[in-house]
Amino acid sequence: MHLPAVSARRATLATFVVSGMLAVVWVARMPAIRDALGLTPSEVGSVLLATAVGSIASITVVGRLAVTFGSDSVLRWSLPLMAASAVALGFSTGYPMLLATAALTGLFLGATDVTMNTQASLIERTSGERVLAGMHAGWSFGSAVGAGLAALTAAAGVSVGITMVIASSVVLLAWVLIQGGYLPDAGVRAGGERRAGRIRLPGIIVVIGAAMTLAYLIEGAVIGWSTLYLHDQFGAAAWLAAVGYLGYEIAMFVGRLGGDRVRHRWGDPRTSVVGSAVATVGLGVLVLATGGPLAVAALVVIGLGQSAVVPILFATAGAVGHDVAAAAIARVGGFGFAGMLVGPAAFGVVAQTASMRAGFVGLTVLAVAMTMVVGRGVGPALDSETARSAAAPRRTGS
């Protein structure tokens, strides 16, 4: 007997929160890791890259595993393994070990990311309620908790290893309490003949993936370069530059917190197009701004606009993927991770050869492209899927 959908929502939301916490807490302690192991800047960059590569490497495999065994089953083992790898990372005694454990942690973070988004998509499809934006708000909240935990332990002189033990203990406690609440992928279990063959995804997944790449590329570049832009371009004080980034993150959180209500009222096609357009306007204002305060306001607008785009893209991938939703979500998630990986580096190349303002001009152009892809490609797919779902019998089981 399975727990009702409301319990599944709470279990999945808790998963988003603890995943966000663990993803951020060790990065926030990077200064201590660097000093303890005597890392060079390039080595620090390689460690962060290893985490991203580990996440990308896990995605295709995890998508197939989740289709075969169910996202609920995969999630039950990815959470404790994520916690264990994070502890190993915290107690790394040298650069090679840190590199390996960072890649391993990234692998299990990626596995958890795919399967928790699959669970959220499954909840939407079985209950008819919008939940994905709120789930991503939970991730944002968890990342803030992770940053806070890192700050508290650093101020108290607690080692990185103990910090990771504390964070991983929270993950394991959550795992014990919530693992029974995940929804089984009922459609997957009925498709035994598909397990042995190649998983075929609808062509629209490539379009959704392209939009996801652009969304994550813009987000990664804004996260990586906005404070430097405020400081160098406008001579903003360090505190004002930090406030600008904080405003972006708070706007992203608030937008996602109320995003599901907006999705319910407007529908996903309109919400995603309006969100993309608002982010584009915000980037345009950031480019044209003549002072720090206006640039900070522009970052808030960008955060609000982008807040619902990624959750809606995950929801769309799950909806069009049907009973291979995990593989569809994994595919578009892979596009997203690639964009997040490329964004800051590509922006850096433009900033080096031209200027940071030119970099944000480029992001504005990409945001226009994202709006067009969402409006002309993803939107029609959503409308088509909505019509198909309305004609099909409603699933009620959980």
Image (spheres, rainbow, N blue to C red):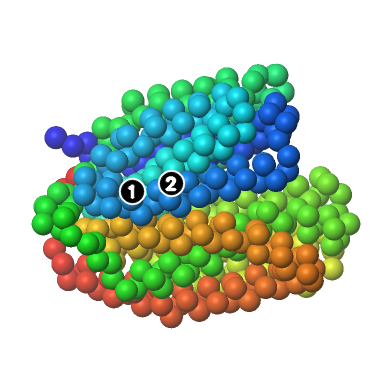
Asked whether 250 or 233 is in front, the reply is: 233
The label on residue 11 is none
- Relative to 224, 134 lies left or right: left
**Where is residue 112 drawn, in percent x and y?**
39, 43
One can see residue 375 in this view = yes
Asked whether 85 or 9 is in front, the reply is: 85
**Label 1 to label 2: alpha-carbon separation:** 8 Å
The label on residue 62 is 1
- Relative to 206, 341 lies left or right: right
- Residue carrying label 2: 110
| Amino acid type assigned to the residue bearing label 1 in the image | Val
Residue 72 against residue 160 in the figure, above or below: below
Q: Is disc 2 placed on a helix, strand or loop?
A: helix
Quadrant the N terminus occupies: top left
Residue 338 against residue 11 in the figure, above or below: below
**Where is residue 179 drawn, in percent x and y?**
30, 32
What's the residue at 76%, 65% (across, down)? 351
**Where is residue 322 drawn, in percent x and y?**
24, 61
